[in-house]
Amino acid sequence: MKNLRIPGPTPCPSEVLQAMAKPMINHRGPEFAQMLDDVTAKLKQLFQTKGDVFLLTGSGTGGLEAAIVNTLSPGDKVLSVSIGVFAERFASIAEQFGAEVIPLRFEWGKAADADAVRRALQVEPKIKAVLVTHNETSTGVTNDLASISSVVKELGKLLVVDAISSLGSIDLPVDDWQCDVAVTGSQKGWMVPPGMVMMSVSQEAWQAHSTARMPRFYWDFTKAKNYLERGQTPWTPALSIVFALSVSLEMMLKEGLPNIIARHARVAKAARDGVKSLGLSLFADEKYASNTVTAVAASDGLDIKKMRKILSEEHQVVLSGGQQSLDGKIFRIGHLGWVTEDDIKAVISALEAVLPQAGFRK
Ligand SMILES: Cc1ncc(COP(=O)(O)O)c(C=O)c1O
């Protein structure tokens, strides 16, 4: 089996995979209603919210679209706080649906600055919502969401958060940090294959929803809420993923959220220390380096493509490259979900063997 160390999809425990082999059930019957109720209650604990949480079928990007179309109207001004590829995608979705997007971009590898967010909101008081990526998977940076949130809320804006690669792995108390919508995906820290998005919706988001006019059909919070009250989802859910989630959430609650968060911090530190011990440099500002993905800069002759090929073919270690303008410039080690320090030690020792073969000269 490969040591799959990309930032999602992630490896899954065998109990989780076995749950997916269960026979189908009626998704409009009592057994599913019970399961959906249970999974939703567990998700609320892990989101640290008393608000609504919906489980819908799709990938993370669908969840981002849902967050936008349910809270905004064409012509609404939104501030896009961007530190990488996924923030740009979030902004593109808003733009596609007719929002007027005001970009606030920071250098890739750095975190967003809350004071700059404040200034941008003061310059344009008509901004209705702020789009933020909590953990930017493309650069391996985690934004200081608590500080950004306090500015956004002080100025009375909606806070719409891409928490796809952070929720369930990095601390994100959705209620304390007043996130109006927070979106995550099953294939990230949840130890489950791709297929479901999970998102929280605050009271303020519901107020925005009541007047939001962006077109929507599949992704509709009102439909999701009405169906959830009957123990259903509006459309046929990816049942096997719900079976898997039901097992993984049980495992997560058994470990306990504080322990999960601490494990991710420890594993991430092992990744950063290991990479540095090989003479490589981190791409991300270490102060904000992510606990779910470590981005490493290519330097000293390192051919990333060659390195990843040898790692996969000869050492069974699968790492990610860089996206868009970072292609060939960085590689990324995913360490979220079902991961221990030993998994990362294996990555570091494989890297040690492969780096000289891929042109790296310290
Ligand atoms: C931060 C972030 N946002 C959005 C996405 C897109 O999610 P998906 O590929 O599930 O649509 C990802 C996936 O890597 C991500 O890490």
Image (cartoon, helix red, strand yellow):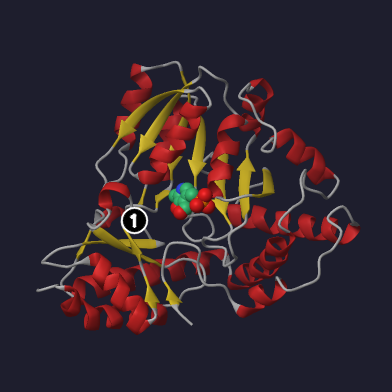
Q: Residue at x 31, y 25 (%)?
A: 119
Classify mark 1: helix, strand or loop: loop
Q: Residue at x 36, y 68 (%)?
A: 319
Quadrant assignment, res 346: bottom left
Q: Dot 1 corresponds to which residue? A: 140
Q: Residue at x 10, y 74 (%)?
A: 361
Q: Nearer the viewer, residue 69 or 256?
A: 69
Mark 1 closeness class: few <14, some 14–19, many ≥20 residues within 10 Å: many
Q: Is residue 299 above or below residue 98?
A: below
Left or right position of 227 against 213: right
Quadrant into which the C terminus falls? bottom left
The answer to whether residue 175 of the structure is visible from this angle is no
Q: Is residue 221 above or below residue 162?
A: above
Left or right position of 341 against 234: left
Tag 1: amino acid: Gly
The answer to whether residue 59 of the structure is visible from this angle is yes
Measuring from the top left, give residue 149's x and y in whole percent: 45, 37
Left or right position of 161 against 194: left
Measuring from the top left, give residue 256's x and y in whole percent: 58, 68
Measuring from the top left, give residue 21's x and y in whole percent: 73, 74
Quadrant assignment, res 296: bottom left
Q: Is residue 333 above or below residue 286?
A: below
